Image (cartoon, rainbow, N blue to C red):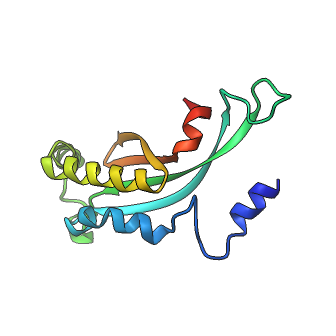
């Protein structure tokens, strides 16, 4: 419980050794291209594969991670005239572009320096969700 309190009681706004501004800075190239980047700091309950505690076989544990959502903002005047299918196609073409792949490669390298890694990139409807975890948690959840 003391670890959870130290996490939630952080006065400087640091999360896993990074601040929200650090993560926003990594995705600046995407936001400069007209995409909306939302960053959320989340927790997920996992049944850990390796026990952190010596006496328990496979306890449950909270793993902290960062969720980054990328979507194309639709202006209010275009909201009803734009087709959702076109928005999905625009996201697909962006994900397959060389620019996006280059940005993600650079982000992965910088996250590696911070002790973090990109666990997954999943497309849901009209947005792309990127999940970022700590490298030390990789042993417990994969």
Nearest the viewer among 73 and 105 is 105
Where residue 44 sits: x, y (%)?
62, 44
| Image quarter of residue 51 | top right
Residue drawn at point x = 34 percent, y = 51 percent: 109
Figure check: 49 above or below 132: above
**Residue at position x 23%, y 45% in the image:** 88
The reply to whether residue 83 is visible in this rendering is: no
Q: Residue furthest right?
A: 55
Q: How many marks?
A: 0
Q: Which image quarter is the C terminus in?
A: top right
Left or right of 13, for residue 28: left
Is residue 113 visible from the viewing direction of this image? Answer: yes
- Considering every residue shown, the one lying at the far front of the view is 113
Residue 119 place in picture, x, y as percent:
44, 40
Q: Is residue 45 above or below residue 109?
A: above
Residue 72 falls in image quadrant? bottom left
With 96 as the anchor, is 37 left or right in this view?
Answer: right
Quarter assignment of residue 37: bottom left
Left or right side of 49 for 118 = left
Residue occupying the point 27% across, 48% down: 105
Left or right: where 10 falls relative to 32 = right
Q: Residue furthest bottom?
A: 12
Q: Measuring from the top left, give residue 113's x and y in whole percent.
A: 42, 55
Give whichever of 115, 40 is nearer the camera. Answer: 115
Task: Please name the residue shown 14% across and 46% down the image.
Answer: 97
Q: Position of residue 32 (x, y in %)?
A: 22, 69
Q: 112 or 31: nearer the eye?
A: 112
The image shows residue 45, relative to residue 105, as above or below, that is above
């Amino acid at each position: 419980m003391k670890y959870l309190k130290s996490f939630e009681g952080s006065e400087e706004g640091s999360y896993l050794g990074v601040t929200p501004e650090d993560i926003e800075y990594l995705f600046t190239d995407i936001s400069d291209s007209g995409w909306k980047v939302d960053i959320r700091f989340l927790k997920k309950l996992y049944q850990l594969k390796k026990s952190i505690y010596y006496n328990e076989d496979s306890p449950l544990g909270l793993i902290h991670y960062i969720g980054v959502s990328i979507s194309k903002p639709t202006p209010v005047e275009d909201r009803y005239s734009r087709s959702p299918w076109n928005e999905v196609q625009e996201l697909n073409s962006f994900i397959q572009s060389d620019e996006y792949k280059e940005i993600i490669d650079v982000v992965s390298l910088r996250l590696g320096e911070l002790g973090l890694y990109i666990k997954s990139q999943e497309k849901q409807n009209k947005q792309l969700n990127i999940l970022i975890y700590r490298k030390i948690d990789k042993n417990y959840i994969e």
